[in-house]
């Protein structure tokens, strides 16, 4: 399985945030499965152990359902990418705006590792 191109990665990362923000979780999950047919792994937060499985991504979706994600910047280098994201939502009954950095590694086997760097509560 070839690694996605720079443009495919950048487009995917921008579009997935839009789909999530619009509450289109089925489309969001389909986009992830299409770009990573070899499977999904996540570190959330980035210092946590690696967890594997689409159920982990779905659980994160439900945890942040209703939040708006705005990709402020995208950088792609080979099979890796980072995005700087403005996250707007409600935490403990109060509206919040926080920023995160998301790091993605696209494996030659079609897998995807996502590492999320975000403020800790």
Image (cartoon, rainbow, N blue to C red):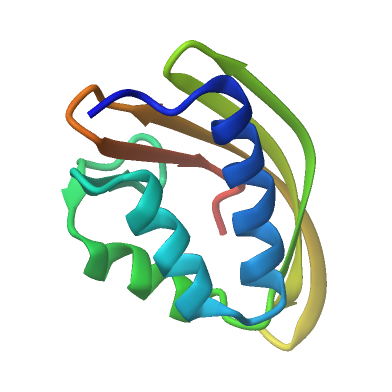
Q: Residue at x 29, y 42 (%)?
A: 48
Q: How many marks?
A: 0
Q: Residue at x 31, y 45 (%)?
A: 36
Task: Please name whichever residue, 61 or 6, is drawn nearer the observer in this view of the structure.
Answer: 6
Q: Is residue 63 in view?
A: no
Using residue 13 as the reference point, say whether residue 96 is left or right of it.
right
The image position of residue 77, as x and y in percent, is 55, 11
Q: Residue at x 60, y 44 (%)?
A: 13
Q: Residue at x 56, y 59 (%)?
A: 121
Write down the quadrant of residue 45 in the picture. top left
Indicate whether 55 appears above or below 74.
Answer: below
Farthest residue to the front: give it.
1
Task: Please name whichever residue, 54 or 11, is drawn nearer the observer in this view of the structure.
Answer: 11
Using residue 27 as the reference point, say whether residue 49 is left or right of it.
left
Indicate whether 48 appears above or below 5.
Answer: below
Using residue 26 as the reference point, say whether residue 22 is left or right of it.
right
The image position of residue 21, as x and y in percent, is 70, 71
Indicate whether 98 appears above or below 24.
Answer: above
Task: Please name whichever residue, 6 or 70, is drawn nearer the observer in this view of the structure.
Answer: 6
Write down the quadrant of residue 73 in the picture. top right
Write down the quadrant of residue 83 in the picture. top right
Farthest residue to the top: give it.
78
Give the quadrant of the N terminus.
top left
Q: Is residue 97 in view?
A: yes
Farthest residue to the bottom: give it.
93
């Amino acid at each position: 399985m070839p690694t996605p191109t720079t443009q495919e990665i950048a487009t995917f990362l921008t579009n997935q945030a839009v789909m999530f923000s619009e509450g289109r979780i089925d489309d969001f999950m389909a986009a992830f499965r299409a770009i990573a047919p070899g499977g999904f792994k996540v570190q959330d937060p980035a210092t946590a152990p690696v967890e594997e499985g689409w159920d982990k991504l779905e659980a994160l979706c439900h945890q942040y359902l209703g939040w708006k994600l705005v990709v402020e910047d995208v950088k792609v280098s080979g099979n890796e990418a980072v995005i700087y994201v403005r996250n707007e939502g409600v935490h403990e009954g109060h509206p919040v705006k926080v920023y995160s950095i998301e790091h993605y590694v696209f494996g030659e086997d079609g897998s995807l590792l996502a590492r999320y760097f975000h403020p800790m509560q």
